[in-house]
Amino acid sequence: MTDRKTCENDILTELSDCTLCPRDCHVNRNAGEIGYCGQTAALMAARAALHFWEEPCLSGTNGSGAVFFSGCNLRCVFCQNHEIAQGLSGREITVSRLSDIFLELQEKGAHNINLVTPTHFVPQMITTLKAAKKQGLSVPVVYNTSAYEKTDTLKKLDGLVDIYLPDLKYQDAGLSGRYSHAPDYFETAARAIDEMVRQVGAPVFTDGTDSLMKKGVIVRHLLLPGCGKDTRRILRYLHEKYKNSIYISIMNQYTPLPQVADIPGLNRRISPREYEKIVDFAISIGIENGFIQEGETASESFIPPFDYEGI
């Protein structure tokens, strides 16, 4: 039998010439080189805890078992989690420790294991999930991503992920180029979401009043100031393509953090009227499977502290 330590020491060949994501960096992360994501091959995370601010069918009453990984392959200028996205926060952990973290979160009552920005660590995720499932991990696994993904990378997760939670941030290449340095974002994310839907199929929920998601895809869209036209295009695209085979989460929680203070258009919050008009539009085109946000969500208090809890 191959022990866990041996598995952790296996050379992750994909990281020796890294092309896991659309950035195609071709760096040797195993040798300590850093990709666009800001990470070497070292598995880095900044928080693992019960999280209550996801969609209701994910957070439920007990919370989602969210593990926040360091680094990001998109790195939007307005990133709400910029501290970890830029690799400024995080602690190195082993694959075996990550497996234990998953099981600890399950023991605490987590409704699911929520992998937040895991794209650049997919080889480690595959090893960890297989090990954890053998050790008794039974709650759904959520892959929480910007959707700037390669379908070939996603295919390696087939059968390991139960719920995909991608963003669809932009339709307009000008916006994605300016704010996320990825003018190819829409076509790339659209292909990725197609693959996610292929893998997990139509939504499946538990019985009862909690109605937790067991399988399915929830596509998130964060409304940005002054970008209502692009938002309408995205909502129409998602509804026309997928109808009720996915859920759409329309988010108003955009928070202008200090790094966007000098960026025109991004240095303000969404007005209630802006958001109301988008919700009215979603209803008018027939979107039924959706989530909206109410109350004061655009607040830094909704950004969790990356204090290494649970790591």
Image: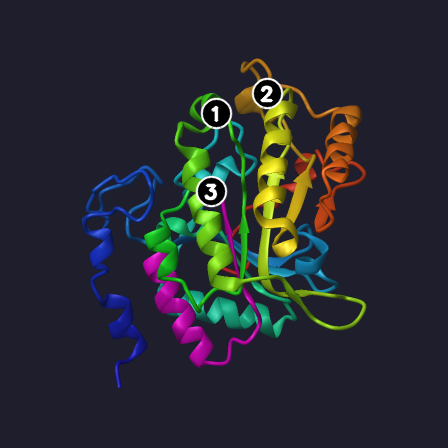
Q: How dense is the environment of label 2, judged by Cα within 10 Å: few (below 14), some, or many (20 and up)?
A: many
Where residue 216 sits in the image (x, y, percent)?
58, 60
Q: Earlier in the sequence, mark 3 or mark 1?
A: 1
Q: Which residue is mark 2?
A: 266
142 versus 2 height, above or below: above
Q: Per the image, is 44 magenta?
A: no
261 versus 283 height, above or below: above
Residue displayed at 70% across by 34% down = 252
2 and 1 marks in contact (CB < 8 Å): yes
120 versus 125 height, above or below: above
Residue toward you, 142 or 218 = 218
**Alpha carbon separation for disc pair 3 and 1:** 18 Å
Q: How dense is the environment of label 1, judged by Cα within 10 Å: few (below 14), some, or many (20 and up)?
A: some
Side (left or right) of 51 relative to 292: left
Where residue 279 sits in the image (x, y, percent)?
75, 35
Where residue 91 sits in the image (x, y, percent)?
41, 52
Mark 1 residue type: Tyr
**Which disc, if any, is residue 179?**
1
Label 2 sits on a secondary structure element that is loop
Q: How dense is the environment of label 3, judged by Cα within 10 Å: few (below 14), some, or many (20 and up)?
A: some
Q: Which residue is mark 3?
A: 190
Q: Which residues are magenta?
A: 122-146
Can residue 86 be spotted in the picture? no
Mark 3 residue type: Ala
Side (left or right) of 17 relative to 119: left
Mark 2 residue type: Leu
Where residue 98 sits in the image (x, y, percent)?
43, 65
Residue displayed at 58% across by 35% down = 234
Side (left or right) of 274 relative to 160: right
Can residue 233 be spotted in the picture? yes
